[in-house]
Amino acid sequence: MSRTLILIPSRLSAVRLPNKPLLKINGLSLINHVYKKAQATNIGDTYVVTGDKKIFEDVIKNGGNAILSYKNHFTGTDRIYEGLINLNNLNYDYILNLQGDEPLLDIDDIKNLNKKALSLNFKIGTLACKINCDKSYYDKNIVKVETNDQISINKFSLAINFFRRNKIIKRSKIYQHIGIYIYKKKILEKIVSLNRTKNERALKLEQLRALDNNIPINVLLAKKKPIGVDTKEDFNKVKNILETNNF
């Protein structure tokens, strides 16, 4: 059995782009594009975990695996833990949380994160990319991560903080965070047992629950900068890319 289980949390209640997971590109829903990307990594078993029956049925209809969860989880982390429980805690060492709105995340970047996490015994691992646009530092919709040291695809560093705006002049160790996490199974169990922290609630950043409780997060650099789908404009960009490349 593979050491890593991939779980993709998904829900229909996004405010900025209603019905986002089921929007179609080349006849396939966004959530199924992400599912197929996860499968293409050949890392391990893959399931979509959702509280919405429409998403569940769409994944199953397209030959995927899905778990129907409680609808009103506060975070994707809490949702995937329910998915893990529903699978009866099968003998996996790591759980990889792949966001349901990141269909352009590079396969090699996902595989590299998984490989480093397993070989270096990460408690939690995630990805980040370089920021090339000055205004991105001030864009609250772009989550930033500050690390102890500069990172590369082969060199990780511990996260110091995650935030939405940056007023710091020195930016050499600040990157754009990419919404993918790999958890050691016992660490995932610990995180969901903890109360949501003040920082997590205020910034709506679930990873702060770990940092606020002194659980280290290792950050690796991604080779490619993906486009997350949060708005109609994002969706149109991703749609154009996938249609142009016939995905």
Image (spheres, rainbow, N blue to C red):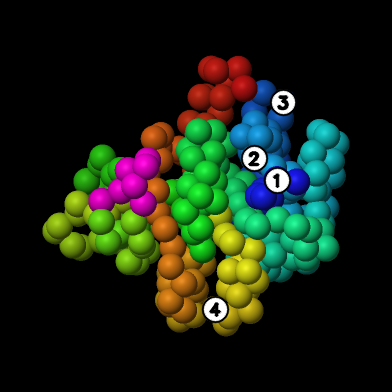
Judging depth in this view, the residue of 241 and 121 nearest the camera is 121
> Gap between marks 2 and 4, in whole Å?
30 Å
Residue 11 visible within the image: no
Residue 44 visible within the image: yes
Judging depth in this view, the residue of 116 and 77 nearest the camera is 116
> Gap between marks 3 and 1, in whole Å?
31 Å
Q: Position of residue 150 (x, y in %)?
A: 25, 51
Per the image, label 3 sits on a secondary structure element best described as loop
| Pointer 1 or 4: first along the chain | 1
The answer to whether 193 is drawn above or below residue 89 in the figure is below
Task: Locate residue 81: give its quadrant.
Answer: bottom right
Of tags 2 and 1, which is closer to the observer?
1
Q: What stretch is highlighted in magenta?
A: 150-156
Of tags 3 and 1, which is closer to the observer?
1
Q: Which mark is residue 43?
A: 2
Per the image, label 1 sits on a secondary structure element best described as loop
Give the amino acid type for the residue marked by disc 1 in the picture. Ser
Give the amino acid type for the residue marked by disc 4 in the picture. Arg
Q: In this view, does 120 lie to the left or right of 34?
A: left
Residue tagged 4:
196
At 18% from the left and 62% from the top, the residue drawn is: 168
Residue tagged 1:
2
Give the amino acid type for the residue marked by disc 3 in the picture. Gly
At 74% from the left and 61% from the top, the residue drawn is: 84
Q: Where is residue 229 in the image (x, y as percent from the top left)?
A: 53, 43
Task: Locate residue 203: give its quadrant.
Answer: bottom left
Give the amino acid type for the residue marked by disc 2 in the picture. Ile
| Pointer 2 or 4: first along the chain | 2
